[in-house]
Image (cartoon, rainbow, N blue to C red):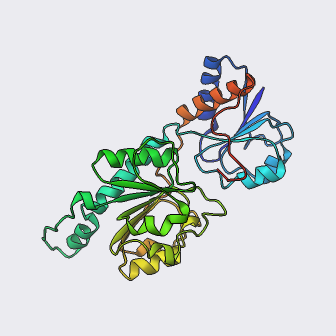
Amino acid sequence: MRLAVWDPDEPFRRWRDALMQHAKETGLAIDVIDACADPDAQAEFALVWRPEPDWLAGQLGLRAVFNLGAGVDAIAPTLHRLHPGVPLIRLEDAGMGRQMADYVAEGVLHAYRRMMDYSAQQARQRWEPLPLPPRASFTVGFLGLGQMGAAAARRVAAMDFPIHACTRSGQSSAGLGCPVAALDRLDEFLAQTRVLVVLLPLTADTRGLLDYAALSRLPQGAHLINASRGAVIDQADLLDLLHGGHLASALLDVFATEPLPSDDPLWRHSRVRITPHVAAQTLVGPSAAQVMRKIAAIERGERPGGVVDMRLGY
């Protein structure tokens, strides 16, 4: 059995060592190959991050493809076109949930404690304590409540902020006990949200979902955190609402074009904080362990968790 790894961003030896270690623990006899260095080698399984379509097309015996990351929008359409019927399997947390919870919690606290205002005061050498809103009025809304969203929502709820959520179906298995609205009630959900946390997958339904009209539904002075996919938000409309003062701040980890071009006005906006797609980074050890457990399940004839529904795109 062969497992091909396509990850230009991580040294292959780290993946090989971790995968071989966990293969031994699960009793799998597997050969791990570097697809970037040996693109002609064939494999039954592939562990990939944004693989070249030509390489993917040349893999003729694939039984399953594992995506390095929670979002699958960059590979799902290509895999479905080239290898219909080959399952695409996403990582389920693998250490990313805690990172996402950290990122979102910092963003919420930064907004609540008015740190953006204090940074502006520091630049003017101004000493002025600012009033805080009642915590009970500072509602945090989670748009998307998958594994990353649920982990972040639990953390924010533990900090005694009121939370609510909006999902495609209006349902959630996260067991948070908070109100959950369906996507067709998005306007109502946004109107009650002081900090909007966007953790949606990028699909045909969510691309450009948060345009000027939608974002305008947020209360005056609301804050935005986007750690999902940049194309969910219309960046030009977001800038207009920041310039006009309707939105107080934005913490952005993802963008329609990455890396964010150096001439993009988001870089220079005083109410925007930018991070380079690091809210929840893939951890080699936990990811390797999970992949090997999933391959072992496939070998036993079982359906592993995390199989992507190609109709929904996640």
Q: Is residue 125 above or below residue 225?
A: below
Residue 243: x percent and y percent? Answer: 39, 81
Q: Residue at x 15, y 74 (%)?
A: 126
Indicate the quadrant containing the N terminus: top left, top right, bottom left or bottom right: top right
Does residue 41 appear left or right of residue 114 in this picture? Answer: right
Q: Residue furthest bottom?
A: 244
Residue in view at x 75 percent, y 41 percent = 87
The correct choice, above or below, for 243 with respect to 104 in the image is below
Q: Position of residue 222 (x, y in %)?
A: 35, 69
Q: Across the whole image, how many numbered discs are drawn on residues?
A: 0
Residue at (60%, 22%) from the top-left corner? 21
Quadrant of the rendered image containing residue 20: top right
* Residue 56 in the figure: left or right of residue 291: right
Name the one closer to the observer, 167 or 17. Answer: 167
For image coordinates 38% across by 64% down, the residue present is 193
In the depicted structure, whether residue 58 falls above or below residue 113: above
Query: Residue 118: image x %, image y %?
Result: 22, 67
The residue lying toward the viewer, choosing from 228 and 216, is 216
For residue 264, say whether it is visible.
no
Tell me the quarter of the picture where residue 247 sits. bottom left
- Residue 301 on image: x %, y %: 75, 25
Q: Is residue 8 left or right of residue 85?
A: left
